[in-house]
Image (tube, rainbow, N blue to C red):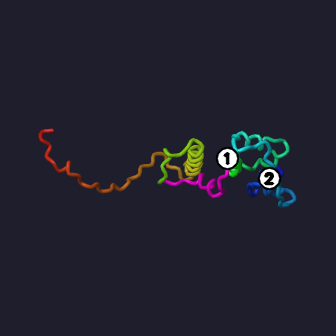
Amino acid sequence: MSFEAKRCGVQFSPPSIVLIYQHKETKDVRKRIIPVRNFSKYSDCSMAAEGLKNHPRHREYLEGVSQSQLEKLHIILRDHMQGLSLEHSLASFRLDPDEDLNQLDDDKLARKKGKMDELFEKNRKHKDDPDFVYDLEMDFSKTTQEKCSWDEEPDDGF
């Protein structure tokens, strides 16, 4: 691979993936605009990202870009075609611990789960990590529970 991807982004008109890359030998930084063809608001983003990554013309430039990042860029393009704002698209990738995931549609739920999986893998400890401990036991401080009225009643033989 003679190119190193530095940044990725989207261009809405015309729908394109914008790649800032550096040539490894000459150290020249360049911008490549990759048009996203045959893509509509009903398209499958994972298939479109896979097709773009395997395209013979763009393959060597996109080698350093992960499949999930290309999928996210395609999702942002698709959301724009559906009339959603950029802020709304980006908010769908953020995790809110107080959000009720039961209320989301399948597409948004898949986005949230993908982000959770990504965060889990990032924080996961592997056996090869220097700070890995095999049988780690942690003592979590117990919070005092409130007394309830039914706790104070006599057992009556039970």
Q: Which residue is mark 1?
A: 68
Depth check, front residue: 142 or 128: 142
Q: Residues within 10 Å of mark 1 (few under 14, many from 20)?
A: some
**How far across and how far down the image is residue 26, in percent?**
87, 59
**Side of 151 where 5 appears, left or right:** right
| Quadrant including the C terminus | top left
Which element is circle 2 on? loop
Q: Amino acid at mark 1?
A: Ser
Q: Please state the extent of the stretch shown in magenta in the rendering.
A: 82-97
The dot on residue 60 is none
User: What is the number of the mark on residue 14?
Assistant: 2
Q: Residue at x 71, y 49 (%)?
A: 81
The CA span between labels 2 and 1 is 22 Å
- Outermost residue toward the bottom? 28
| 21 inside magenta stretch | no
Indicate left or right for 5 with 117 as reference: right
Nearer-N-terminus badge (2/1): 2
Residue 155 image offset from top left, x and y in percent:
15, 43
Q: Residue at x 23, y 52 (%)?
A: 148
The answer to which of 114 and 108 lies nearer the viewer is 108
Residue 99 relative to residue 107: left or right: left
